Amino acid sequence: MNALEHRYRRILRLLPAGYRAEREEEMVSAFLDGAGPAADDATARPRWPEIVSVAALALRIRLDGSGAWGRTVRLTALIGLAFQATMSCVYLAQTLNVHGLLPLPFPTGEPPIGEPASAERLWHLAGDLSSLLWIVGYVALVRARPRVAKTAATLGLIGYALSPADTPESLVLVVATLALLAGYHRDVPAHRQPRWPAALPLVAGAALFLIVSTATWAMTTSNHSPQWPGPWVWAWSWLPPSGLFCLALLVAGAGYVVAHRAVPRWRSASVPLALAILTVPVALARLSYLNPGSDQVTDTLNAVTVAQALALVLCGTILAVLGARMSPTRDAPAAVIGAAE
Amino acid sequence: MLSPMNSRGMTEQAFLVLTALADESRHGYGIVQEVERLSEGRVQLKIGTLYGVLDRLAADELLSLDREEAHQGRLRRYYRLTDRGAHALEAEAARRTETARYATERLRARHAAGPA
């Protein structure tokens, strides 16, 4: 074995073992045929485009339509987009309300920025309306239009990056969008869901908007009380997007663990693994809220935030273990030519 | 796996690989060379890309393993077009020919109408 062949074989280790066992020899042969006289040069190295093509093939095989990892990544994207679509409904409702278009008896959110019809007002309004992209992305994904979903999510992420929003809160969006881009490739069969899941974020978003708005209004009206903030300090850490997602993940994780123990046929590898993956960016986003202050309110806020992060780590670990136990022990089946004979 | 003959039609790479196998069976690098020749150098398949295309075409039973040979102590697998692959290639070639005919007719009409 010459040096170039050795290097090619090292690159092929990116491929799943089952696929490599079937294909390694002929792929090495094709590589060396392509190298020509350079194959005997001890300093010759595989070119980067070849390495990238093998890495892309390895990713595609691992995330194929039937494998546990493929389903996990796609479910990660779906849950991430579902949550962001729900939050987007909340943001849109807040936008409508601050512009006086919702008949609520109390104001919610900040008043509109800039003079009416000014460029500043329109710029901020456009930013607020960009939330629609996540709703479009989620609905497109549910309705088996992954290319539309990818475009909408990518534009939504770009819009988020351009806005002065908190960066750690966008971590979960980055993870969901990457999962969407990687998991829904051309080898994944299109699977159209019923219409009703597409409406879930709208229903959940409307309910969440009313809860968050009512809580915010109640806090605002009681902030002149001598006992302020009182018990509200325990609720604050649950109201940002990552706090709400933390709560949703903890409830979903606990629900899955109960179902896993009670109903064996509901056991799955992809559901707990997808939830476990999402606990990581949400825990990091929560930790970004830690404040160095030392008064009693700040200490309480920090304590709740640390408890949230620890609960997410614990929940994620349990789910990852359960998911790993349910994962197939062998690699994704290789779609080998010989099998088509 | 999803068919390369999806709603967006057959991919350029799949079309070229099937075309490369239309006249004779070829091994991996032989397909790469033939695709490059057929496309006049425009498409240079990387090995990882080639085997991704071969996987999809084999899953759709458009090609299959023809034989294995040892060449300078290395394994070469030769692939051939199946009957189903020949039909798919024929249909895709007809579709592309029809599209090219429309383009030619419209360009001819444009030239006949003179400069805009």
Image (tube, coloured by chain):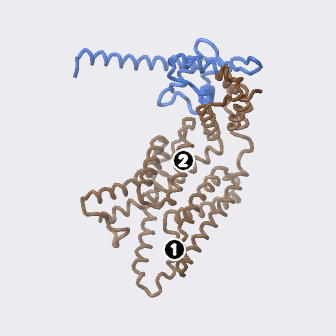
Chain colours: A brown, B blue
- Whether residue B54 is situated above or below residue A166 in the rendered picture: above
- Please state which of residues A165 and B90 is positioned toward the viewer in this rendering: A165
Secondary structure of residue under mark 1: helix
Residue A81 in picture, x, y percent from top left:
50, 52
Q: Is residue A27 visible?
A: yes
Of labels 2 and 1, earlier in sequence is: 2
Q: Which residue is mark 1?
A: A235
Work out how far the residue at label 2 is from the one at label 1, CA to CA, in angstroms: 31 Å
- Please state which of residues B26 and A238 is positioned toward the viewer in this rendering: B26
Q: Residue furthest top?
A: B23
Residue A237 in picture, x, y percent from top left:
52, 70
Give, as a three-letter code, the residue at label 1: Ala
Q: Quadrant of the N terminus of chain A?
A: top right
Q: Are marks 2 and 1 in contact (CB under 8 Å)?
A: no
State the image quarter where residue A12 is shown. top right
Left or right, residue B60 beside residue A12: left
The crowd level at tag 2 (other Cα within 10 Å; few <14, some 14-19, many 20+) is some
Give the residue at x 33% y 16%: B105
Residue A318 in picture, x, y percent from top left:
69, 60
Q: Which residue is mark 2?
A: A178
Q: Quadrant of the C terminus of chain A?
A: top right
